[in-house]
Image (cartoon, grey):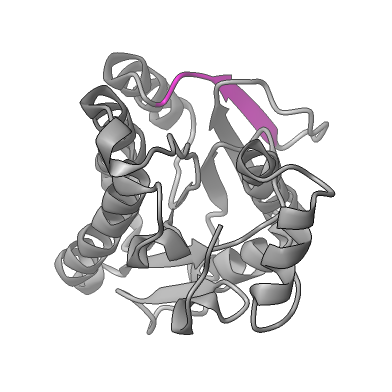
């Protein structure tokens, strides 16, 4: 079994990404966090890279520098933004930005790490999509790009499986993070109503998502690839209204 434990996590400075970083560190990984802000995690095996992952040129420079320093064989692409708007107000510039962040960045990251993965005949790629990939009001650009992750992951799973590289997707929602509270006011009646509408009768926590990521990242789980795991309290089998 592969002994190399070096992981890269996008959006590792806050919310779900930060908890994923903490979990991987606790499991003995060396972790590279790539995010707009420096992570506050204080750990000798944590390397923080400040980069705007919606900027293709900046991302290319950052990931190439990363793979020169670290033999990354586990990738978790968690960084994301919403850009909520009803259809008449959707801006194509927002769509372009989310394509670059959710899809383009994932391609750049995996392409950069592939040589090391192929050399070891081992790799773990986990993309963070969203329950919104199934459709949600005001989420045209977000849902489109998060749904695009599913097709990419299934394609990569087929291409890379013979080389010991798995590719899977975790689709969360609704999770109590700063991004969630950018849309729903914390402590509001709307938040209480939303929690009551979730089949399990609560909102999710970042740790709920991190545990799912940990399953796909585990070196022992090489027989699972091309899959999507909804960590959503049951909302993917019903309706959800924000």
Residue 189 percent across, percent down from the top left: 78, 55
Q: As rendered, which of 222 and 11 lies closer to the eye? A: 11
Does residue 195 sit above or below 81 in this rendering?
below
Image-based side of 142 in relation to 2, left or right: left
Tell me where the magenta segment starts and ends, as one range: 46-53
Residue 98 percent across, percent down from the top left: 33, 35
Identify which residue is drawn at 46% across, 84% down.
237
Q: As rendered, which of 201 and 157 lies closer to the eye? A: 201
**Residue 56, quarter of picture:** top left
Magenta highlight on residue 51: yes
Identify which residue is drawn at 48% across, 27% down.
69
Residue 232 percent across, percent down from the top left: 57, 72
Does residue 101 sit above or below 171 in this rendering?
above
Q: Can residue 27 be seen in the rendering of this structure?
A: no
Q: As rendered, which of 82 and 137 lies closer to the eye? A: 137
Identify which residue is drawn at 17% across, 71% down.
158
Identify which residue is drawn at 55% across, 62% down.
3
The secondary structure that dominates the magenta segment is strand
Residue 239 percent across, percent down from the top left: 48, 76
Q: Can residue 145 be seen in the rendering of this structure?
A: yes
Image-based side of 169 in relation to 199, left or right: left
Magenta highlight on residue 101: no
Image-based side of 156 in relation to 164, left or right: left
Does residue 47 sit above or below 118 in this rendering?
above
């Amino acid at each position: 079994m592969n002994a190399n434990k070096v992981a890269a996590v996008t959006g590792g400075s806050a919310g779900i990404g930060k908890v994923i970083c903490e979990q991987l560190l606790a499991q003995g990984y060396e972790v590279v966090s790539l995010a707009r802000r420096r992570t506050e995690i204080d750990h000798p095996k944590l390397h923080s890279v400040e980069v705007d992952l919606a900027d293709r040129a900046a991302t290319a420079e950052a990931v190439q520098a990363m793979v020169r320093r670290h033999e990354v064989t586990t990738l978790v692409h968690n960084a994301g933004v919403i850009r909520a708007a009803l259809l008449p107000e959707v801006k194509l510039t927002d769509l372009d930005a989310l394509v670059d962040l959710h899809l383009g960045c994932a391609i750049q990251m995996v392409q950069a790490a592939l040589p090391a993965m192929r050399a070891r005949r081992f790799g773990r790629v986990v993309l963070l999509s969203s329950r919104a990939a199934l459709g949600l009001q005001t989420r045209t650009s977000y849902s489109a790009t998060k749904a695009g992750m599913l097709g990419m992951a299934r394609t990569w799973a087929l291409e890379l499986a013979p080389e010991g590289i798995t590719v899977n997707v975790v689709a969360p929602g609704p999770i109590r993070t700063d991004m969630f509270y950018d849309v729903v006011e914390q402590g509001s009646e709307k938040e209480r109503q939303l929690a009551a509408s979730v089949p399990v009768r609560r909102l999710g926590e970042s740790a709920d998502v991190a545990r799912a990521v940990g399953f796909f990242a585990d070196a022992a789980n090489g027989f699972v690839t091309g899959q999507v795991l909804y960590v959503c309290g049951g909302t993917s089998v019903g309706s959800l209204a924000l």
